[in-house]
Amino acid sequence: MLNSNFQWRTDSLAEEVVFSIEDAVYFKDFEAHEGDEDSGRSESEESRSTVVFPQTEVKVEKPRMYRVLLHNDDYTPMEFVVSILEAYFDMEQRRANQIMLDVHRRGVGVCGVYTKEVAETKTVLVTEKAKMHQYPLKCTHEVDRDAYDV
Ligand code: TYC
């Protein structure tokens, strides 16, 4: 709908308030329909007019981000954890090995920070992969609080 046909008369509708693009489309369609019946105004006359958008402030918030965490356990082989970090978290072997050892020593570590859906998907995929191999590797995600609670 967002092309040159997407227009709107200024005279009779100038005082209408448009809250969203959907509203504007609705009024345009409505007017075109009314015109056909009442004044015989054609679709092309309608589309020559101009749309007025009110001065509304649009606030866009940054999406909340989530950290994906790996947890240490005594059974999952180190090589398997490294392969997970390479495959699902886009790490080179050297970095994957560092993160794995960090988790091994500290108990938990961050593999990456993502939007909610991506973090959820990675958590599920890693957990399933570990289960397939019968390893108890635990992968979770949580809100990346430091980025928000300043
Ligand atoms: N602690 C495991 C071992 O010694 C290795 C390991 C590292 C397991 C990180 C899980 O998230 C993990 N084989």
Image (cartoon, rainbow, N blue to C red):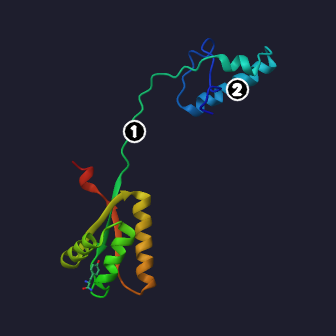
Where does label 2 land, which residue?
30
Mark 2 element type: helix
Residue 83, located in which quarter of the rendered image?
A: bottom left
The residue that appears at 39% across and 62% down in the rendered structure is 119
Q: Tell whether circle 1 marks a residue whose Cβ is less than 8 angstroms from ligand 1.
A: no
Q: Position of residue 24 (x, y in %)?
A: 60, 28
The residue that appears at 79% across and 13% down in the rendered structure is 39
Where does label 1 land, which residue?
60
Residue found at the very far left of the displayed protein: 105
The residue that appears at 44% across and 65% down in the rendered structure is 121
Q: Position of residue 130 (x, y in %)?
A: 40, 81
Relative vertical location of residue 7 with respect to residue 65 in this rendering, above or below:
above
Q: On the rendered structure, is 5 left or right of 103?
A: right
Q: Amino acid at mark 2?
A: Phe
Q: On the rendered structure, is 107 left or right of 117?
A: left
Q: Say whether disc 1 or disc 2 marks the residue closer to the N-terminus.
A: 2
Residue found at the very far top of the displayed protein: 11
> How many residues crowd mark 2 within 10 Å: few (<14), some (14–19), many (20+)?
few
Q: Position of residue 137 (x, y in %)?
A: 34, 80
Residue 3, located in which quarter of the rendered image?
A: top right
Q: Amino acid at mark 1?
A: Val
The residue that appears at 70% across and 22% down in the rendered structure is 31
Quadrant of the rendered image holding ligand 1 = bottom left
